[in-house]
Amino acid sequence: MSGVRVLVGTRKGAFVLTSDGIRNKWNVNGPFFGGWEIYHLKGSPVDPNRIYASQTSSWFGQIIQRSDDGGRTWHQPGTPPGEPTTTPDGMPKGESNKFVYDTSPETGKPLTTHQWYDGTQHPWEFKRVWHIEPSCTDPDIVFAGVEDAALFRSVDGGRTWHELAGLRDARGSQWQPGAGGMGLHTILLDPSNPNRIYIAISAAGAFRTNDAGKTWKPINRGLKSEYIPDPNAEIGHCVHRIAMHPAHPDTLYMQKHWDVMRTDNAGDSWHEISGNLPTDFGFPIEVHAHEPQTIYVVPIKSDSEHYPPEGKLRVYRSRTGGNEWEALTKGLPQSDCYVNVLRDAMAVDSLDACGIYLGTTGGQVYVSADSGDNWAPIVRDLPAVFSVEVQTLP
Amino acid sequence: MPIRVLLPYHLRMLAHIGGEVRLEVTSPATQRTILDAIETRYPMLRGTIRDHVTLERRAFLRFFACEQDLSLEHPDTPVPDAVASGAEPFWVVAAIAGG
């Protein structure tokens, strides 16, 4: 019988939740990496046993962990357990936690500057990995979106990382951090075209490459942000999350700081689809696994009050690709609920009855096994949830 | 005599270290040679105590020995004789903070 494996990153460790295809009874495993911030975990679409995790700490920096057995055991891929700690020529391993901006004259760029909060220029400084995106075709190829915003790639299973430095050419000097930092948080790989990648950065906007990361173009036309000096600027929009259905890679859905947006031409132009949402502020956005026009958001009251309006946790679903939204409330708290759902904390499985998952800053992880009509908690008392991903298992 | 090093809990977990670390360090022992020796034996700790590129101590860590804060000493200054002889340990201490 098919099943699911839900990968949960929290403020104090990682958890792996498993169930059969009914998604009614759950096993909870963890915490893994207890006490560490786990920004994101994600499994390879090619090899579900291969999972990557971003483990970070203000004290000790960035660690990349990898599992080759579906999350049961983990290791730092630069130094697998039992292997020599040096290479045959005596050089130390342990490079899997090394994220250094590419400043080489051949492939990189001089370490340029971006805008600081006060508008002055500030050098790039690596802080942490926000998002991990394994390749659609090779379990050893994996991308990492980092703060300060940049895209890194590993082609050796996470042992070493190299920046795709061309992204900083896309007006990097104009990028500016939001209050939460200048993080590259969204990486969408076009399954039909390995050369095309979309990324998004807070608070710079969305970008696209058509040549596998050598050159990048801002794709923010149509976005309007009243909180920046030029509301229609090419750079500076605080994009919170972008989602794509793999069968329709030209259509993207965006939850912006304010506004829910859509493009049907790969980001060349966007239009608003907020429609009848009670508020168009929020963080995550997802697309139904089998219905490319069915999308989900979690409205949040405002950028000053990061909790659901009226104390009611409601997922909103549109079956029309936007504009017409319905509230999904059955099984979700409808009074006195003041949690947030962060940008990477919603996911969908690909079982016939599509499952929707969300995690909250209050430590709850909810599942709907019927496309959002009914919800139930899987766990209620985890640390604050940063990210939720789900693997559909055979 | 080997130099004795005490690491904070999370670094011991990362490196699968049960307790105190004992390292042979070329004389004269300094912060730099001690940290080089730690990272050579436990490469998974590279970047967790000092920056990969600048080799500067991470902001929320400090170095103590013999009831002295050595954090602001030059990395190439010899550590106290009691540390070099193994009589006293070299402590890597993480700031107490966070929620």
Image (cartoon, coloured by chain):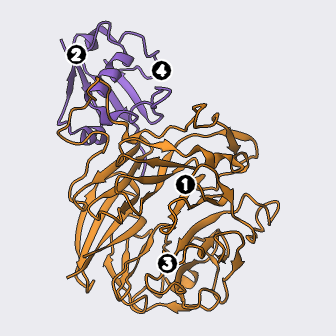
Chain colours: A orange, B purple
Disc 4 sits on a residue from what chain?
Answer: B
Q: Which residue is the site of mark 4? A: B72
Disc 2 from disc 3: Cα separation: 59 Å
Which of marks 3 and 1 precedes in the sequence? Answer: 1
The image's mark for residue A247 is 3
Which numbered disc, 2 or 3, marks the residue closer to the eye?
A: 3
Disc 1 from disc 4: Cα separation: 45 Å
The image's mark for residue B24 is 2
Quick check: do tags 2 and 3 share a chain?
A: no
Residue A265: image quadrant is bottom right
The image's mark for residue A168 is none
Dots 2, 1 in contact, CB < 8 A? no
Disc 4 from disc 3: Cα separation: 57 Å
Dots 2, 3 in contact, CB < 8 A? no
Q: Nearer the viewer, residue A192 or A23?
A: A192
Which numbered disc, 2 or 4, marks the residue closer to the eye?
A: 2
Q: Which residue is the site of mark 1? A: A212
Q: Residues within 10 Å of mark 1 (few under 14, many from 20)?
A: some
Dots 1, 4 in contact, CB < 8 A? no
- In the image, residue A29 above or below residue A333: above
Disc 1 sits on a residue from what chain?
Answer: A
